[in-house]
Image (cartoon, grey):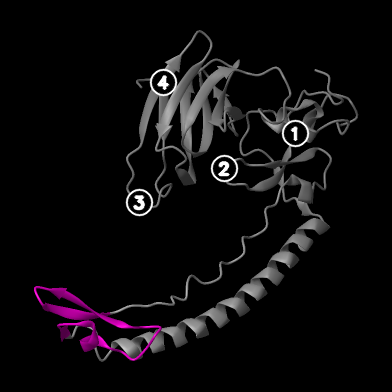
Amino acid sequence: LGSALTLEIPQGAVSRRTLVTVSEVSAARNEREFELEPHDLQLQVPAQLIVDASSEMELSHRENERDVRVENQVHEANHLRAELHHLGRIKLHPAHADDDPQTHDAAELDGGSHGDGGVDGGTLEGDTCWDGTSLPRPALEPTPTASVADKFSAWQKAMNEYQVAAAAFSAAAKEHADAYNAAAQPVAGKSCHQNADCDTGSLDFPGACRVYYEVGQCVVQDNNPIGSGPAAPAQPDLSCADFTCSDSSYQCEQEASTQGIACILQRCGRHGGGGK
């Protein structure tokens, strides 16, 4: 798209050769939308998106009919640079003045927290906040609460039960396969004229003659298939509700595409208690 938008995908970002296309799908007075395809392509190494924009603009992903602010945006001269962890629809628009944590970066909330959990209702300054431009943004490892251990304990119990069920299924499947093979081996593929020529002596695995112009071949049917085996339990879903941050200048945030969780340093110049 000329000098308007550049997408830089580093080596190792995708596991196989992939055609990536970039197109502008709409433009208005204060907004532009770009389509980066294939949609929802996960990048193992973040890509760099560079778009011509003033300092009053920001970028958002379009996800589930809502805008989610792109992380790690930095204004450089007359353009905006951001990291992308997956492809999809990107919107360039004026920075939002509201503080809805569901549609914009939770780190930009007043005081950097929800409800009455702001930092003393004052302005964040100095080393206790992020300036909005320097990268990488400071982050701390979140502290797990008891719910994390509870969830993984329940998952481990389910995994142990799955292993027992899988072992039992494996034994039953082997017994079934041995019986099927024993019944089929004498007659499978044998020339025949009628079903009697393909008799296996088994009710579970009877033989049949597939005739064409009075000549055919024996096949063996499975009248009692064993079905599919047990499925492994899904690993626990974790969220910021399962973690705390050891430093009050940091707040927990979960990345939309990778679901990774970290405590990130709050943005400078914001007030606590819901004010501007």
CA distance separating discs 4 and 2: 22 Å
Residue at mark 1: 266
Residue at mark 2: 257
State the residue in front, 103 or 8. Answer: 103
CA distance separating discs 1 and 3: 37 Å
Residue 236 image offset from top left, x and y in percent = 67, 57
Tag 4: amino acid? Val
CA distance separating discs 2 and 3: 20 Å
Residue 68 image offset from top left, x and y in percent = 60, 30
**Dot placed on the residue nearer the N-terminal end, 2 or 3:** 3
Q: Residues at badges 2 and 3 in contact (C-beta under 8 Å)?
A: no
Q: Residues at badges 4 and 2 in contact (C-beta under 8 Å)?
A: no
Q: Is residue 268 above or below residue 27?
A: below
The crowd level at tag 1 (other Cα within 10 Å; few <14, some 14-19, many 20+) is many
Residue at mark 4: 25
CA distance separating discs 2 and 1: 21 Å
The C terminus: image quadrant: top right
The residue at the point 65 percent across, 71 percent down is: 159
Residue 96 belongs to magenta span: no
Residue 201 belongs to magenta span: yes
Local secondary structure at mark 3: loop
- Range of residues picked out in magenta: 191-219
Residue 215 sits in quarter: bottom left
Residue at mark 3: 16
The residue at the point 57 percent across, 42 percent down is: 257
Residue 227 image offset from top left, x and y in percent = 47, 72
State the residue in front, 26 or 183. Answer: 183
Residue 267 sits in quarter: top right
